[in-house]
Image (cartoon, coloured by chain):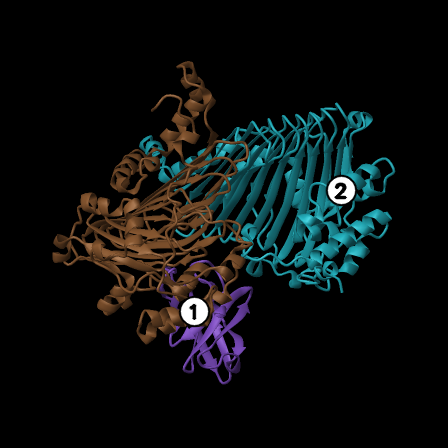
Chain colours: A cyan, B purple, C brown
Amino acid sequence: MSASTETTIALNEGVTEALSREAATARSAGEPEWMRERRVHAFDVYARTPMPTRRLEEWRYTDLGEKLDLASLSLGTRSEVADDPSAWPAGVRATMEEDWDAAAHVVLIDGTVVHVDLDEALAGKGVVVTSLRDAVNDEETWEDAKQYLATQAVKPERGKFAALNCALYLDGVYVYVPRGVHVDLPVRVTRWISTSAAAHFDRALILAGETSKVTYIDEVLSDDLDTHTFASNAIEVIAKDGASVQFVQMQRLGRNVFAHSQQRTLAHRDATANTLNVALGATTSRVDLNAQMLGPGSSSEMLGLYFGDGDQHFDHNTSQDHVSPHAFSDLLYKGALDGDAKAVFRGIIRVHPKAQQSDAYQTNRNLLLSETASADTLPNLEIAADDVKCSHGATVGQLDEESLFYLMSRGIPQEKAERLVVMGFLGEILLKVSLGGVIEKITREIERKLAHV
Amino acid sequence: MSDWIRVAALDDVPPGTLHGVKVERTAIVLANVDGDVYALRDRCSHADFPLHDGVLMGETLECVHHGAKFDVCSGKATGLPAIRPVQSYEVEVRDDDVFIRLG
Amino acid sequence: MPQNETVQDLQLDEYKYGFVDEEQHVFRTQPGLSEEVVRQISANKDEPAWMLDFRLKALEVYESKPMPTWGGDLSTLQETLDEIYFYVRPQDKMERSWDDVPANIKETFEKLGIPEAEQKVLAGVGAQYESEMVYHSLKQEWEDKGVIFDSIEDGLKNHPELFRKYFGTVIPTADNKFSAMNSAVWSGGSFVYIPPGVELETPLQAYFRVNQERMGQFERTLIIAGEGSRAHYIEGCTAPVYSTESFHSGVIEIVVEKGAHFRYTTIQNWSNNMYNLVTQRALVHEGATMEWLDGNLGSKLTMKYPSCYLIGEGAHGNILSIAYAGDGQHQDTGGKIIHAAPNTTSSIVSKSISKGTGRSSYRGLLQVHDGARNAKSNVECDALLIDENAKTDTYPYIEIDEKTAHIGHEATVSKVGDEQLFYLMSRGMSEEEAMALIVRGFIEPIAKLLPLEYAVELNRLIELEMEGSVG
């Protein structure tokens, strides 16, 4: 046996009856051959990649052995819910009623697209908002899908869970904006999880043509579930030359959910790929976000906000890759932790050789509201070019006593004063976005959590 | 108060040895000191590695990963680099089975 | 500053300590590490049986641990380790007077300025050549006050109870692969005891010299600073430049008792063929202060993160780390502070320069345990890049389990500033001259240090540096 074939080791960690090669093949029923091959290849990568342990730097503070039990999960299946709001769970209707301003709506229940609508004028300009399944099959879109789906951004080789999602995703969202077209109102995606004890996989591919513009708001939510459930999601953003993409994810899943979102933005020459990740729900919430500054003049503003209580565990793993010169990235993640909640932030700025005149910044700030809350923060830098402006900072502390004292001296009761200070702390993030209904939802959810403080 | 849960047979953890088990995704290490069984969270308070990889000398568990030491009866750290205790659990041996209470 | 000085003129890249003495030794082990080598070292030192057991157990631990995959590039280290001498005994016994030290060795230390510095500014000096301390001396007045400053071997021999109480308790054998290696083959280093209440006015200095090609040096130092005492220990290190690689791995354990104040300064200027993998840790009790001043200028690769375990209320830890990475060098340095008690405070300041193909990495850990109320810590890292191929990394780990903790970390990376350059050039300097001036300012604390008799002056400068950054 030659050395090269020996290097492929079949580990099969995390391969179960539900999460199997057969399941990956079955998922591609009705899909073109290239997609079937892609899923099977992804599954093979999954099977031969060892399950991440705490020995891996990126999983140092999230113990999958204790937080995720793949063996207990069935594979999420297609939802049979009709394309009719009255048939949707109340939670979906409630959250959609609060949205205003939308160019398009997509509703997914347990990873199945049950509804899509798109402004007709935009459709007339060539904008596409559709289910990923349709995009893969439709003759107008399949070539782009074939080129970009899990090939450049969140491809199987990114890691065990990127591979698993590619192999087993049920459906997702495909957005295409042609060159020069500006989609002024957001594309609003509402993803609902209702089946517990299952592993749900969905993804999105957002393709912004040259100098186009689009905003994508992804809201994922559920009730509290009775048993351990896994919700995996992959987001691929490709901003071509001069394009501008704003991606927002609002995670309000219920307890017992392990939420995992893997996101990657590719910004080409002069393109902008901005992200906002809001994590409020789930028992364990892990976000992997990699921003690639691929072209000169590209930029990425990366915002994050989290509020944990009870036994919630949030893990944000971010990276900013400056591959080309003259690019800009700025990350600000802020979070408050109450109860026994724990937050992990691991961020890295990588300035690659020759990426001169990079401007890259990274800040993580944490507020501990209880004796038993904790925060681990690892803001890393790897700089291999000398003409750069890079800095990072991290803080962990409690409520600002001076602000509290000031508010209380003005007659505001302590409890209310504390809430105001927390809102003030987190509000810095919200001031940077103005998207119809988003701020209101986040604010209300934080206030609800604060009411228990 | 939570229930007693059977976690192992007494034979799984002979005197002078350690044995790792999982209870509802929580890893627990059992230690048998001359017939008395103790249970600790199976996670070193220094760097979170599993304690069941370590060695038991009398009532002292030495973590193999960085040399930290713990008193298995109380979970107290007795040797650097650990300073913090690890959680300990109530144990009962009934006939040939080991029960613990997560508490 | 003289006119027309350039960065090259600062001679950071010019190694002045690379001279070679004639090779002389009375005993050395076979190249490589084995149980036989460990037994020979122990037999050579005529140790008690428990120490041989300790070493053999450590060898097992060493062999069971994988080579680290983080930090610097250790991919070819094993080949180096298979070829080096783990133990070279240069002479039969340690001397108390320079006159008794063999001429060639004495000459080496004279060239390094040690006896002169001893006379002028030091309370005591220890000098290690290859694997053994060849000279150890403490001024009479301190000896009279009960201060012990001896080779580690004499510490074991003459103070067995004190030695055994603390040895291996701050840094257990299994702490990491190289602490295990050191525990198996340690030789040389200092044993220091400062009695309660004694305040040393001038520093103790240990000097480490490797002359033998393909040499591994494994000093082991144990320091106990008694209640309310005050002292400063300085170590310096140099070696000749060989085309083959050498290896240095020390273990430094320090116990700072209640209310004591201890400072440990390292001026590491190993030649650029040296792997320098060192574990240094201090256990800091109530109201005590530990300061690490860590200057890393030499070596091929240094991995070294001095740490303070603040286990008593009100304990304080300071780490000042200064690194210079020239062509082909990687300085992977930083520090660790563990806040395990209330009202503990700490500060880490790291400054690095990377030039040519050099790489400096800051790696730090800041931990606040639950119950360490009102812990305060601040970390600042500044990295300066002088060439487009130079690299710098910052890896701070911050783990906070205490609500009342107040923690900040900041890091900046810059190249030599255009504005500063422009200003200086507008005053008539060439770009190179202006650059040199800026770099000199950045590394002032260390550049002033060479040759070594200026250690004390360096220290004052570092102190000034700390004043601005602490509190």
Residue C382 vertical placement versus A256 (above, below): above
Q: Position of residue C465 (x, y in %)?
A: 31, 35
Estimate how packed mark 1 is, as few (under 14), some (14 to 19) or many (20 or more) residues with alpha carbons within 10 Å.
many
Q: Is residue C182 visible?
A: yes
Please tell me if label 1 and label 2 are on a single chain. no
Left-right relation of A15 to C34: right
User: What residue type is disc 2 on?
Assistant: Leu
Query: Mark 1 — on which chain does it sit?
Result: C
Q: Quadrant of residue C453?
A: top left
Residue B55 vertical placement versus A254 (above, below): below
The quadrant in which the N terminus of chain C is found is top left
* Local SS, label 2: loop
In front: label 1 or label 2: 1
Residue A43 vertical placement versus C122 (above, below): below
Query: What's the CA distance linking mark 1 and mark 2?
Result: 59 Å
Q: What residue is pinned by disc 1? A: C37
Q: What residue is pinned by disc 2? A: A149
Judged from this view, the residue extending furthest toward the right is A139
Query: Mark 2 — on which chain does it sit?
Result: A
* Local SS, label 1: helix
Q: Quadrant of residue C468?
A: top left
Judged from this view, the residue extending furthest toward the bottom is B95
Left-right relation of A164 to A341: right
User: What residue type is disc 1 on?
Assistant: Val
